[in-house]
Image: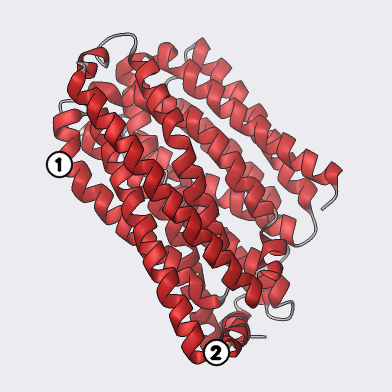
Amino acid sequence: MRARTLFSLAAGRSSFRLAQLAATVILLPVWGERRYGVYAAAVAAFTWLIPLLQSGPEKTVLKLLPRAPRTGPQIVEALVWFLWCLLIAAPAALVVTLASGERGRTAIYVGVAGVAAGSGVTLLLAGLHRVTGRPWLDARSAFALAILQVSLVGFAIAGLRPLGYVVCLMSGQTTVNLVLLVKLGRPSLRIRHRPAFLRRVLWTVVLMGLPEVGLYLATSVVFAIMAASHWSFQVGQLFVVLIVWTAGLTLVMYALRVYAPLASIRLLGRAGAAGRSRAAQLCRWIVAIDMLWGLAFACIVWRFDVLAVTRTNHALWVWSVLYVTRTPGVLLTILAGYLVENSDARSIRITATAAGISLAVTASTGGLLIPALGGFGVFGALVLAEIAGAGATIFMIGRHRRLSTIRGSGRYRREVPSVTGD
């Protein structure tokens, strides 16, 4: 990829993320704790829809198209057909809700769910355009959405309330998605005439999407638990810091996604085995870092009355420090998963299983820790889940290596056609 193209992609995505950050920070004082708390809880509850619609399908296309130039277009055509259906369904659900006379919390939740779905669609469409040779549409759509976001913040300052904000955001987002969909050509379901191939592709989409879906769903789970507890007053400020923190992580994940087709080719065969070994080493670092972090965290919570600080104006600083210190472990988790999922066909089961284990640990430990510790319980649950996921990844990579040794590496090279259909 040329440096100029990469720069335009990074500039477009950065402008959109900066606009989102500005909106997150500004809307809290504009709407106040109560109104913003409802909006923030809704956004946190549905963030998992974004990777559900984007991560699995996009990563599948980015991985398989370089390996399967003949059958890849059938996958793209089927995705376009699905996205047309979704483009109609999401706004229709909000229209029906508003037509029924609902203007309160339910309407906001329905609208935010539609916006989250639309965001996932936008990211998937941008990825499809990149992989089919039109990266400039990715950058242009990001710039358009950034302008929309900034304009709506101005309207919010002028008096636009959360429901109106969500309606306008969905309208602009749908327009951008419509333009991107039209430029991808006609939809088609000719892939249904190859049912065995379709089942393999769908299974690949599910497995490749689970890690990011699990990551976002874990956030939704812990915020839902906290919103239902007596610590609900912490939701707004904790959400603001979360959005600012995840902006950097999102750019890292986007950069990795841009180079995913190249990584898919480079991690074939023996290179894939080396990549998984490197991922196992990264997971050992994750476990060590998180255990040290957890020990320091427990000592501070036990020694100082930090819970009282979260009830003051200094709460933002507390959450910021905790998120910043969590960054190394999260970055290593993302990189380890990237190396594994872009190697051979069976490796996506490793990342999917680890994601499922992490989500289960998040829900179970969060249910115990959050009612007692509030936002600190959120961090405790997420760290324990990350350790569990890293440990599971180490175990499964070792098992994969043993099976590869027994069966021979030739079988794993032959698995690529079995997934792609070529």
Q: Residue at x 45, y 49 (%)?
A: 285
Q: Residue at x 48, y 24 (%)?
A: 24
Q: Nearer the viewer, residue 30 or 397?
A: 397
Q: Residue at x 72, y 46 (%)?
A: 138
- Identity of the amino acid at label 2? Gly
Q: Nearer the viewer, residue 243 or 395?
A: 395
Residue 278 spot, x, y in % from top left? 55, 60
Residue 275 in which image quadrant: bottom right
User: Can see residue 327?
Assistant: yes
In the rendered image, the vertical position of residue 279 relative to residue 233, given as above or below:
below
User: Element type at marker 2?
Assistant: loop
**Would you name the residue on which mark 2 appears?**
408
Residue 170 spot, x, y in % from top left? 52, 38
User: Can see residue 223?
Assistant: no
- Is 91 left, or right, of 44 in this rendering? right
Which mark is drawn over residue 368?
Answer: 1
* Residue neighbourhood size for the residue with mark 2, other residues' Cα within 10 Å, grouped as few (<14), some (14–19), many (≥20): few
- Identity of the amino acid at label 1? Leu
Measure the C-alpha gap from mark 2 to mark 1. 45 Å
- Is 66 left, or right, of 174 in this rendering? right
Residue 12 in which image quadrant: top right
Q: Earlier in the sequence, mark 2 or mark 1?
A: 1
Q: Residue at x 25, y 52 (%)?
A: 361
User: Element type at marker 1?
Assistant: helix
- Is 64 left, or right, of 354 in this rendering? right
